[in-house]
Each structure stands twice: as structure tokens, then as C-alpha cells.
Amino acid sequence: MAAGSRRETLRKALKLLAEAGWTLSDKGLLNADKQPLRFEILLVNPNLERILQPYIEDLRRLGIIAGLRTVDRAQYKQRLDRFDFDMILMTLQQTLSPGLEQWQYFHSSQAAINGSKNYAGIANPVVDVLLNKLLAAQTRDDQVAAARALDRVLLSQHYSIPNWYLNNHRLAYRNRFAMVTTPPYTLGLRAWWLKTLEKPR
């Protein structure tokens, strides 16, 4: 992001925070009770710390105090299962036929169950209705319509902060492999073979 656009984004963020009752002072961003806005980002992979540093620096410019805590896998899993975190970095895996995984991630029935995948604690009746429509869809068109409506509602509620996106796979491989034309939406690794195993025609 260019420096100018970043400054403009920070100005907009400060304006929105001020409208919500937060005040920037030399002690940080304070609410009406003079309490600072602070939170912790829980990680399991130390390599992600450098990726989050620019985000933390931008938050600092807003007066928000954000810290990183990297723990081992056992502690991370335990804290996730108990929802004992402020923020996490998480990939929510999706399939080409949406329904069940979205229900696990976003349905209110999962919000208070320890060990569930509703990490954001979403308990929104509108989201529940759309999830039920998604699961009940009988045609692909109905499924797509319900999924798009669900997507719009989830985005409008700001439950998560998108971090990055790649629209292609980055792959390096030796010239010993042969493969079919890559099918859409997948690498097709299960259809690769060693050239030495090819039978002459």
C-alpha cells in the first residue's frame, strides 16, 4: 500500500473511532471510561510475527495497543478450544459445494461449544437463517444465491479482517513429473506421475 493511501486510511479509521466514542491521547486510544483499547494476537507459528508487524505498527499509530503472543501447538489448541484469545490468524477452509463448513464456522449453535470452529463467537439470527437456506438449497443456483447473501452479511458485520489473498498456486517441481492439464480450482497433484513409469505407446 502506498504511503499516501495508508495515511488516508488511518485518518478514516481515526474518524470512525471518534464517532464511536474513542479519544486519542498520549496514553493511547481511550474509551469514555478512559480505558485504553488493547488486545493480544495469539499465534502458533513464529514466522507469522513479521507478517503482522506492519498491522501492529498501523494500530500503534491509531493509539491501539496490540501485542503478539506465540505459544506451542498444545497450548494454542487448548486456548482455541476454550476461546481464550482476543484475535487469531486463521484460514477457514472452504469447499466447492458450500454448506456444512459454513454452518460450523458461523452458526449460533456453535458459538458457545468448546472446541467448535465458530472462533468469532458469531450468534446472529440473520446468519442462521441464511445458513439454513444454504443447507436446504436444492439447486446450484439456490446454493450460490444463499452463499452470496451469507457472504454479504458476514462481510457487513466485520467479524474478521482479511489478511491476504492469492488467486493462483505457486509451485516448483522437478522435470521428472508428468501431469494432465490442470483442472480448475485445484493443482491436480493426485493425477501426477513419474515420467520413468510411462509405458511407450
Image (tube, rainbow, N blue to C red):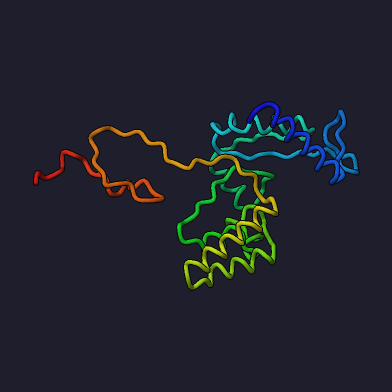
Q: Is residue 46 visible?
A: yes
Q: Position of residue 72 (x, y in %)?
A: 55, 38
Q: Position of residue 63 (x, y in %)?
A: 79, 32
Q: Position of residue 199 (x, y in %)?
A: 11, 45
Residue drawn at (45%, 57%), measured in percent from left and top?
Answer: 96
Quadrant of the image containing the N terminus: top right
Is 183 placed above or below 100 here? above
Residue 22: image quadrant is top right
Given residues 15 and 32, the one toward you in this image is: 15
Residue drawn at (53%, 41%), measured in percent from left and top?
Answer: 165
Q: Residue furthest right?
A: 33
Given residues 55 and 41, the one toward you in this image is: 55
Residue 65: image quadrant is top right
Q: Is residue 161 left or right of residue 189?
A: right
All told, the count of numbered labels is 0
Q: Is residue 115 visible?
A: no
